[in-house]
Image (spheres, rainbow, N blue to C red):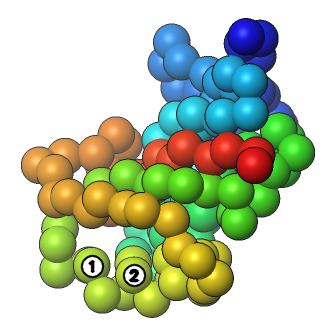
Amino acid sequence: MKREVINTPHAPAAIGPYSQAIQVGKTLYCSGQIPIDPKTNIVLTDADIENQTIQVLENIGAVLKASGMSYRDVARCEVFLASMDDFAQMNEVYSRYFNESPPARVTVEVSKLPRGVKVEISCIAAHV
């Protein structure tokens, strides 16, 4: 099975030794995205959870598009929150992107996220 690195300038460049995504066959494994604006490379640490979640999901959308996929192809998401107090607001934004047959998901509170952000999301998508 072919293994391909997915990289797009429309999502933030990796800030460590990892790829934006790896596609193996028809399955795409997306690395966690944080709210970095890919045009300016600025981390949106001062933004509220709603705007951070929007940026994260836009970044994921860019990676999905680079692999020929869309939000509809996402089978599983992992959401990491710096505070579970942000769950309802994050969930409201998330539901705008995954409004039809939403993927399986896990959401956990973590003690700290990269660059002091409030949310990070990773996903697995597959062509059927």
Is residue 113 found left or right of 65 in the rendered image?
left
Q: Position of residue 114 (x, y in %)?
A: 34, 40
Where does label 2 land, which residue?
91
Left or right? Give the position of 30 relative to 111.
right
Q: Secondary structure at mark 1?
A: helix
Q: Residue at x 70, y 57 (%)?
A: 73
Res 117 seen here: no
Nearer to us in this view, 75 or 8: 75
What label does residue 87 carry, if any?
A: 1
CB within 8 Å, label 1 to label 2: yes
Occupied quadrant, residue 109: bottom left
Residue 55 appears in view: yes
Q: Which residue is pictured at 55% across the width and 44% down the height? A: 124
**Residue 50 in the image, given as x and y percentages of width and height:** 46, 81
Residue at 28% across, 45% down: 113
Q: Check disc 2 and report its element: helix, strand or loop.
A: helix
**Which amino acid, by three-letter code, is at mark 1?**
Phe
Judge left or right: residue 110 versus residue 45.
left
Measure the alpha-carbon separation of dots 1 and 2. 6 Å
Classify 10 Å Cα crowding around label 1: few (below 14), some (14-19), many (20 and above).
some
What percent of the width, then of the height, locates residue 107?
27, 62
- Picture mark count: 2
Q: Which quadrant is the N terminus positioned in?
A: top right
